[in-house]
Amino acid sequence: MRIGLVAGPWIPVPPVTYGGIERVVDSLARGFAAAGHDVVLAAPSDSTCAVPRAPGMRPAHSDGLGLAISELSHVVRAYAAMGDVDIIHDHTLTGPLYVERPDQVPVATTIHGPLSADAVDIYRAIGRRAAVIAISRDQCSRAPEVPVTRVIHHGMDVSSVPMGSGTGGYLCFVGRACADKGLLEAIMIGREAGLPLRIAVKMRDPDEIRYFREVIEPMLGPNEDFVGEVDDAIKYRLMGEALAFLNPIQWSEPFGLVMIEALATGTPVIGTRIGSAPEIIDHGRTGYLGSTEQLAGFVHEAESLSRAACRKAAAERFSEERMVNEHLRLFEKLLAGEAPPGVPDAIGLHQNL
């Protein structure tokens, strides 16, 4: 197959630091190419993913993050380079609705965010013209009216992540500086458990800066070590030496990529039982899930969990290879006409659910 991949305009592929969607797109692009397919990636021009890239794209501009006009301009340029592909996998919101896309070329799109009321309206419309991929069962269960074609969990190249020892004597938190990610709760869990907490967060957007300055910074004390935003090498070392990774999210996150990153380092995850977390963490084996109030009580139990089992779960259930192969099987069915867009039972969504 000749596969066109469309990423967003705001972050390079792969990202230097923050960028979960861009990490997934990078894995897919490299995985499709390794499987023998031709790939053309429409991404910011300063991307470094080692596949052929669409010409005429602009550099990443994070200042416009989330702006429709920024994404629409990017989509127009991206689809201009897709004239000779067999199938398009679009990771933008607006691209699948673009009327000037190539005729007779199937489009699949991945829902990366929560299915809010506004998003439901958009994806119901997209589902009439494209195959819709959800990233967790929890995500699509919240909007059964959206015609989801397949649930495909994210994956990553576990072999590229060093196994940690877990001997650092601390807990760690990695995420964005916002209330939804549970940073405040992580601070309280660390204190209650009597263990230091190392904190690595993205803090660029005005809302993130405001939340950190007004809520988190006044809370920081001798038990917390704030290390800021970090690259992959530092992040994996931070995770790998931690006794446990804290993920006390306060919203129904569609998929927590950071959880499989922690498991890949061998570190068990302690988090709230909401969103996609129960699809990723095996309670009592690769971590512990419960209410926010229960989590501090699980910290010392996590010391007895097998780090090898955590690593094995990441490699077997959330590998880059598994993710790539599930997408390729879907693309083959779409090209064969066996999975018309918007017909979930055509390829077994209900088996996935």
Image (cartoon, grey):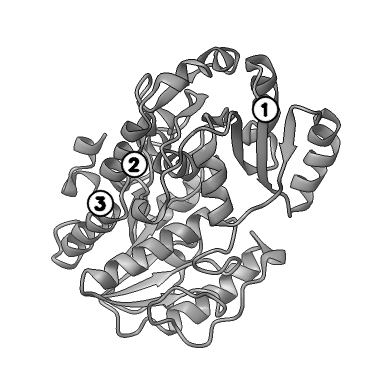
Residue at the spot of label 2: 314
Residue type indicated by callout 3: Arg
Q: Nearer the viewer, mark 1 or mark 3?
A: 1
For residue 52, which quarter of the picture?
bottom left
Question: Is 176 displayed left or right of 275 in the figure?
Answer: right
Residue 3 in view: yes
What crowding class fits label 1: few (fewer than 14 Cα within 10 Å), some (14-19), or many (20 or more)?
many
Residue 207 locus on image (x, y percent): 76, 46
Could you tell me which residue is drawn at 38 percent across and 32 percent down? 307
- Is disc 3 placed on a helix, strand or loop? helix
Badge 1 marks a residue whose secondary structure is loop
Residue in the image at 52% along x and 32% along y: 167
* Alpha carbons under labels 1 and 3: distance apart: 36 Å
Q: Position of residue 160 (x, y in %)?
A: 39, 56
Give above or below for 104 relative to 288.
Answer: below
Dot 1 amino acid type: Pro
Question: Pointer 1: what residue?
Answer: 196
Q: Is residue 23 left or right of residue 39?
A: right
Q: Residue at x 25, y 51 (%)?
A: 322
> Mark 2 falls on what kind of element?
helix
For label 2, the crowd category at 10 Å Cα-Cα, with few meaning under 14, some 14 to 19 and many 20 or more, is many
Q: Earlier in the sequence, mark 1 or mark 3?
A: 1
Say which quarter of the image contains residue 320. Answer: bottom left
Dot 3 corresponds to which residue?
A: 322
Rounded to the nearest angstrom, the CA distance separating label 2 from label 1 is: 26 Å
Mark 2 or mark 3, which has the lower sequence index? 2
The amino acid type, in three-letter code, at marker 2 is: Ala
Counting other residues with Cα less than 10 Å from the Cα at mark 3, is it few (<14), some (14-19), or many (20 or more)? some
